Image: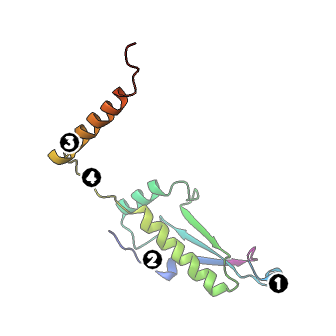
Amino acid sequence: MITIQIPFTEMDFTYVRSRGPGGQNVNRTNSAAVLRWNLWESLVLDPELKEKLAQKLHGKLTEEGDLIIRSDVHRDQDQNRSECIHRLHEILRRALFVPKKRIATKPTRSSQRKRLESKKIHSEIKSLRKKIGS
C-alpha cells in the first residue's frame, strides 16, 4: 500500500455559496469549499505513479489534469475544507489500491465426498416422486 501526503501548497481552494444546511445564512456566506489539485504539477508523485493515477481517475480529471472536489456538507468553511482534503486522500487511496491475487485451490476430499453424498440423497428424493407402474 502506497501512502501519499499531498502538501497543502499544491491544493488550491476557492469558496462559494453553499447548497447545504444553514438556512438563510447560506445566502450570505461562502461556506462551501472547492478543492482543485493538479495531478501533473504535483511534486510528490513520480511520473509512473502519475500515469497510473491518470488512468484510474480519467473520468474525474479535467483536460488540464485537475481533480476538483466540492464540499458543502458542513456549515463551516474550515470543516468543508477538511472534508475536501479527506476526500482527496480517499480518492487517491482507492485509486492506488491493488487487490491481492487469488490463489486457486482444489476442493478437499471431505468437501467432494459431502457434495456427492448430497447429490445422491437429492437424486433419491426425486426418484421417489415418480409414479409407480407407469
Look at the picture and state if 63 lies above or below 94.
above
CA distance separating discs 3 and 2: 52 Å
Mark 3 falls on what kind of element? helix
132 horizontally vs 32: left or right: left
Look at the picture and state if 99 lies above or below 134.
below
Can I make out residue 41 in this image?
Answer: no
Residue at x 41%, y 78% (from the top left corner):
5
- The residue that mark 4 highlights is 102
CA distance separating discs 2 and 1: 32 Å
Mark number displayed over residue 112: 3
Region rendered in magenta: 15-20
Mark number displayed over residue 28: 1
CA distance separating discs 4 and 2: 32 Å
CA distance separating discs 4 and 1: 54 Å
- The residue that mark 2 highlights is 6
Residue 21 position within the rendered picture, expressed as x and y whole percent measured from the top left: 74, 79
Mark 4 falls on what kind of element? loop
Q: Main secondary structure of the magenta part?
A: loop
Closer to the N terminus: mark 4 or mark 1?
1
> In which quarter of the view is residue 119 placed?
top left
**Label 2 is placed on what type of residue?**
Ile
Q: Tell me if label 4 and label 1 are in contact, CB under 8 Å.
A: no
**Label 1 is placed on what type of residue?**
Arg
The mark closer to the camera, 4 or 1, is 4
Q: Nearer the viewer, residue 90 or 47?
A: 90
CA distance separating discs 3 and 4: 21 Å
Look at the picture and state if 52 lies above or below 75.
above
Q: Residue furthest top?
A: 134
Residue 120 position within the rendered picture, expressed as x and y whole percent measured from the top left: 26, 34
